[in-house]
Image (cartoon, rainbow, N blue to C red):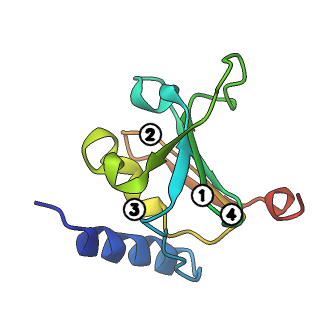
């Protein structure tokens, strides 16, 4: 069974591959997800805003664009709930603030800094 320590090791490895500072997600705070994350739609996307009062800063969704056709297109969830529902994203949640990732279940992976996230 995968533990949170295993996930943190995976996060550190991802950061090391891209020469980035591991910035652990605060498991006591919420992250934001769109329901599309739990669909078969690809790719899976994530972006990390600076940490807020009650949210760690992560926004996760699936598809080419950020879904904006729903009333509440992002909803809060505790990070640990992704263990069962979408574990593929957990190893990316140690990326620093301002970073984005895009992945699929066939090995595609793209990670980049989006300065506009930090300039908000």
Image mark for residue 104 = 2
Label whose residue precedes the other's in the sequence (1 or 3): 1
Q: Nearer the viewer, mark 1 or mark 2?
A: 1
Q: Are marks 1 and 4 in contact (CB under 8 Å)?
A: yes
What residue does disc 4 label? Answer: 52
| Apparent side of residue 73 relative to residue 9 in the rendered image (left or right) | right
Label whose residue precedes the other's in the sequence (3 or 4): 4
Q: Are marks 3 and 4 in contact (CB under 8 Å)?
A: no
Q: Secondary structure at mark 1?
A: strand
Spatial CA span between label 1 and label 2: 25 Å
Q: Residues within 10 Å of mark 4 (few under 14, many from 20)?
A: few
Spatial CA span between label 2 and label 3: 13 Å
Spatial CA span between label 3 and label 4: 21 Å
**What residue appears at the point 40 percent right and 23 percent down from the top-left corner?**
40
What residue does disc 1 label? Answer: 55
What residue does disc 3 label? Answer: 91
Q: Nearer the viewer, mark 3 or mark 4?
A: 4
Label whose residue precedes the other's in the sequence (2 or 3): 3
Label whose residue precedes the other's in the sequence (4 or 2): 4
Label whose residue precedes the other's in the sequence (1 or 2): 1
Spatial CA span between label 4 and label 2: 28 Å
- The quarter of the image holding the N terminus is bottom left
**x, y percentage for residue 68?**
72, 23
| Apparent side of residue 102 relative to residue 5 in the rendered image (left or right) | right
């Amino acid at each position: 069974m995968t533990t949170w320590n295993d996930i943190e090791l995976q996060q550190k490895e991802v950061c090391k591959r891209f020469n980035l500072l591991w910035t652990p997600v605060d498991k006591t705070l919420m992250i934001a997800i769109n329901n599309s994350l739990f669909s078969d739609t690809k790719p899976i996307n994530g972006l990390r805003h600076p940490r807020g009062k009650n949210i760690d800063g992560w926004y996760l969704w699936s598809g080419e664009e950020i879904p904006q056709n729903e009333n509440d297109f992002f909803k809060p969830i505790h990070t640990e709930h992704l263990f069962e529902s979408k574990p593929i994203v957990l190893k990316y949640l140690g990326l620093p603030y301002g970073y984005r990732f895009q992945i699929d279940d066939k090995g595609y992976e793209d990670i980049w800094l989006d300065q506009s996230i930090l300039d908000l």
